[in-house]
Amino acid sequence: MKRIHALAVAVVAIAVVAVPVGALAAKTDPGQTDPNAKADFLGKIKVGRTKATLQVTYSCNAGQTLWISAKEVSSGKADKALEKESSSKISAAWWQSHRNPVTCDSQPHTATFSMDKKEKGSKGALKSGKAWVQFCVTNGDALVLSAHDFVTVSA
């Protein structure tokens, strides 16, 4: 009996360590120049009055500029149309930023990134629901990392 209980505790402990709560392995773009680059979105997008934040664990070999974007339709539901090129035209809300620092040194980093409506094209108000998030790192003109997926918004 004690042996079965110890085994159950060990299995639960391994599961807790192996699967971080709220982690979402974002889909990556096969066209990125760093095949080992990746990003995991952690938790929800937290929306404040003037900015929204998302915690991300990422790794990349080289990169200078990060662009993070969250788009949402008026219903707040995950809409596949947001995955298409020029989807900002159909979005009710689009918050973004090119101003977050990024560290690309082949090591995993976890950071909280912010988005707002300061940049051209941004619009609307993010509300509770699902937003299409794009997380892109470039090195000059080369796309190093491109990760994207729907993420829950907590407004």
Image (cartoon, grey):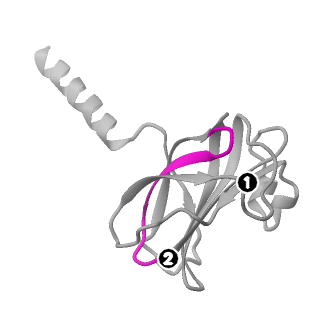
Classify residue 128 as left or right of residue 54: right
Position of residue 110 measured from the top left corner of the image (x, y, whole percent)? 40, 54
Q: Which residue is pictured at 87% across the width and 60% down the height?
A: 89
The extreme top residue here reads 1
Tag in front: 1 or 2:
1
Position of residue 58 measured from the top left corner of the image (x, y, whole percent)? 44, 60
Classify residue 14 as left or right of residue 146: left
Q: Is residue 94 magenta?
A: no
| SS at circle 1 | loop
State which region is magenta: 47-63
Q: Which residue is pictured at 77% across the width and 53% down the height?
A: 80
Q: Quadrant of residue 121?
A: bottom right
Determine the CA span between mark 1 and mark 2.
22 Å
Q: Amino acid at mark 2?
A: Gln
Q: Earlier in the sequence, mark 1 or mark 2?
A: 2
**Residue identified by numbered label 1:** 117
Q: Is residue 135 above or below residue 6?
A: below
Q: Residues within 10 Å of mark 1 (few under 14, many from 20)?
A: some
Q: Amino acid at mark 1?
A: Lys
Q: Which residue is pictured at 47% across the width and 76% down the height?
A: 63
Q: Is residue 61 magenta?
A: yes
Position of residue 4 measured from the top left corner of the image (x, y, whole percent)? 18, 21
The extreme right residue here reads 90
The extreme bottom residue here reads 141
Classify residue 19 as left or right of residue 126: left
**What label sits on residue 11 in the rendered view?**
none
Q: Nearer the viewer, residue 23 or 115?
A: 115
Q: Nearer the viewer, residue 63 or 143?
A: 63
**Residue identified by numbered label 2:** 64
Q: Is residue 80 above or below residue 62?
A: above
